[in-house]
Amino acid sequence: MLSKHVTRTWVSPAYFCSVEPSFSAVADYAEPFAGPTAKASPSFTREKPNMFQRYFGLYPLAQRIEDKKRGVGVQRYPIACWALSTAMLGVLIYELVTNQKAQGTPFSFKPVVNPMLGPSSSALIQLGARFPPCMKNVTDFPITTPIPCLNDTANPATLLCSLEDICAFGGFHGETPNQWFRFITPIFLHAGLIHFLLNMLAQLTASAQVEREMGTISFLVLYAAAGIFGNVLGGNFSLVGSPSVGASGAIFGTVAVAWVDLFAHWRYQYQPGKKLAFMVIELIIGIAIGFIPYVDNFAHLGGLAMGLLVGMALYPIISPSNRHRIIVITLRLIAVPLAIVMFVVLIHNFYKTDPYAACSWCRYLSCIPTSANNHCKGYVVVAPLWFWELIIVSYLLPKEPVRLAFPDLMSHMLNTFIRIQHRVWFVEHMRRLDFTFILAIHRM
């Protein structure tokens, strides 16, 4: 018969910190107990704390420190991460089905290839992408600007729809565009299959571990705040005609909690200096990725900033001394109002002022100036519907394709209309010409 007591084997904390512990490993070491001759220690003889006690630290300090070193968090399963990932998979399937119905293929290859293997930009806008012209009046993108329809596959576009039709969700009813929910819906949308897989890889690993350590309720508050604020910041300073989608802002917010954990529990981390160096490199790489096409760096930066504040306010922190506890409480009290102020100021700035006027250089945090995006203004020549008709006519008459470079386009159109002796009609329309601009397509 086995003895009722088992001799406790000491294992170096470095073992647990050198690798990410699995659930089985945590189960093996989560409840240490004393040997037959050892003195009873309160920190090792108490029952396993419940979720409430873990979050608020209502169990012995020594056991809390031991749990931190082992990677034992508030709960065992990342329920919210699993549920969010499942919902996002369903939304992605719906995106691809929508594009299949419109273009005959789930992936957009015409008129522009979506490198993320996903639907067209028009489809993403109609499904709820962050798109400022659907949310407010945009000077550089008036409500009369035509947009390629979902089923358009020609370049230049031959099937044009109104902004109201593409924005969908019941339209504007003759009023100012105000689809405020586009700060929220982009979190659940993705630019394509590749985008989805990359985000889910991060969400089901790094974000899932954060949920285990924080608990589902606190994690959902963090996730929502970081995701929405990332879209608010992007709506202010990204290219105003650029549809943006993705959970990257929310995921960056959860990653920010790792910074809170590192500095709050520096003494309990295994090789914290080395860990800090790796985190800095990861952050630099993440920001650098934000400069490539189809990625919105403002969503990353906004999610990171809000994640730091909300993480500071909600993340369970071990305070071994009164001094440490006072510092933590002070930072928590600062973080909450600061997060609220940031939301209020940037939402007001989005609706009431010109963000570019307030910060003309901010656009370069997510854009490398090129001629393709008009040096980070992102404008390509687009005219009212009647002007698109001119382009189509001038495109169909000659055999060679029309180039969209402004001087070449004007020269080509002029020669075309001279040949068909419509000089008077052409000059009349040139007098009425009032160019508007749209921004180059750009997704998160």
Image (cartoon, helix red, strand yellow):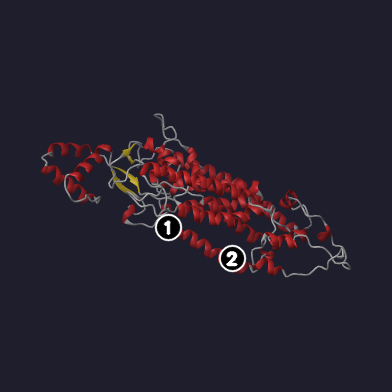
Percent x, y of residue 352 = 45, 39
| Type of the residue with mark 2 | Leu
Q: Is residue 232 visible?
A: no
- Circle 1 packing at 10 Å, graded few (<14), some (14-19), many (20+), is some
Q: Residue at x 23, y 43 (%)?
A: 391
Q: Quadrant of residue 269?
A: bottom right
Q: Position of residue 141 (x, y in %)?
A: 35, 41
| Viewport quadrant of the N terminus | bottom right
What is the number of the mark on residue 77? none
Which residue is the site of mark 1? 291
Is residue 121 shown left or right of residue 206?
Answer: left
Residue 13 at x, y percent in the picture: 71, 68
Q: Which residue position holds label 2?
A: 276
Q: Mark 2 falls on what kind of element? A: helix
| Mark 2 → mark 1, Cα distance in angstroms | 24 Å
The amino acid type found where label 1 is placed reads Phe
CB contact under 8 Å: marks 2 and 1 = no
Of label 2 and label 1, which has the lower sequence position?
2
- How far across and down, in percent of the image, does residue 331 sit? 65, 52
Residue extending furthest front? Answer: 1
**Residue under the image location 41 percent in, 32 percent down:** 172
User: Please, is residue 422 above or below residue 359 in the view?
Assistant: above
Identify the secondary structure beneath mark 1. loop
Q: Nearer the viewer, residue 267 or 80?
A: 80
Image check: 142 left or right of 321? Answer: left
Residue 42 visible at all: yes
Q: Nearer the viewer, residue 371 or 186?
A: 186
